[in-house]
Image (cartoon, helix red, strand yellow):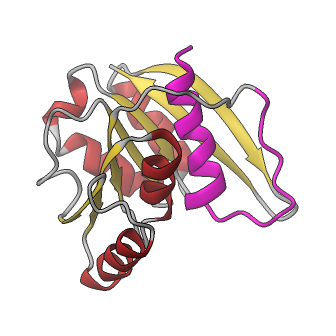
Amino acid sequence: MDKRLTAIANCVALTLLEIPNDLSIPDSLTPYTEPMAVADIGTDHGKLAVYLAKTYGCTVYAGDIAEGPLSACKSLVKKSEVTDKVIPVLCNGLEKIPEQVSTIVIAGLGGETIAEIIDSSPFCLSGKTLVLSPHSHEDRLLGYLSDQNFATLQRETVLSKKKSYIVLMVKK
């Protein structure tokens, strides 16, 4: 397994899901060292995007559908001094994200919404690695991925005292 991808899954668990300090990260989620182009869809306040840029040198397209969260993302990007690495994008799903990204992260949304984003973005079906973490309706996302013949490269369960979350790495 590509350690760069498992590190992104780790980052999702640590930064985007905002699970409390009782988080238990699986040992298989380990850091990588080579930068890559990543899309962070539903970036919210941009914590994952900033973390990937600062820690791993990734270029991150931080996409969100709402102005408010994207404004918070822009502020964090500026404060964190990663304006050369994080590109905030006001967009619905992947509509304005360049196709050259190699990895697409969609986390913190419902499984149905994640499936709709993938389904409406044909370039997701062309060899991109997707890191997905639904906050609800994970069964619907898993059904969609199965129906669309996505291969699961990795599946981890991230635990807190209150809830467990899945983090999937898939590719078609």
> In the rendered image, which quarter is residue 83 located in?
bottom left
From this viewpoint, which residue is outermost toward the top? 1
The residue range painted magenta reads 1-27
- On-image quarter of the N terminus: top right
From this viewpoint, which residue is outermost toward the bottom? 68
Residue 82: % across, % down: 36, 60
User: Is residue 147 found left or right of 101 in the rendered image?
Assistant: right
User: Is residue 162 found left or right of 136 in the rendered image?
Assistant: right
Query: What residue lies at 58% left-to-right and 47% top-to-bottom?
Result: 11
Query: What residue lies at 32% left-to-right and 85% top-to-bottom?
Result: 68
Query: What residue lies at 56% left-to-right and 49% top-to-bottom?
Result: 12
Query: What residue lies at 62% left-to-right and 29% top-to-bottom?
Result: 155
**Image height of 86 relative to 78, above or below:** above
**Image height of 76 relative to 145, above or below:** below
**Image height of 156 relative to 139, above or below:** above
Residue 80: % across, % down: 45, 68
Residue 166: % across, % down: 64, 43
> In the rendered image, which quarter is residue 163 located in?
bottom right
**Image height of 166 relative to 113, above or below:** above
- On-image quarter of the C terminus: top left
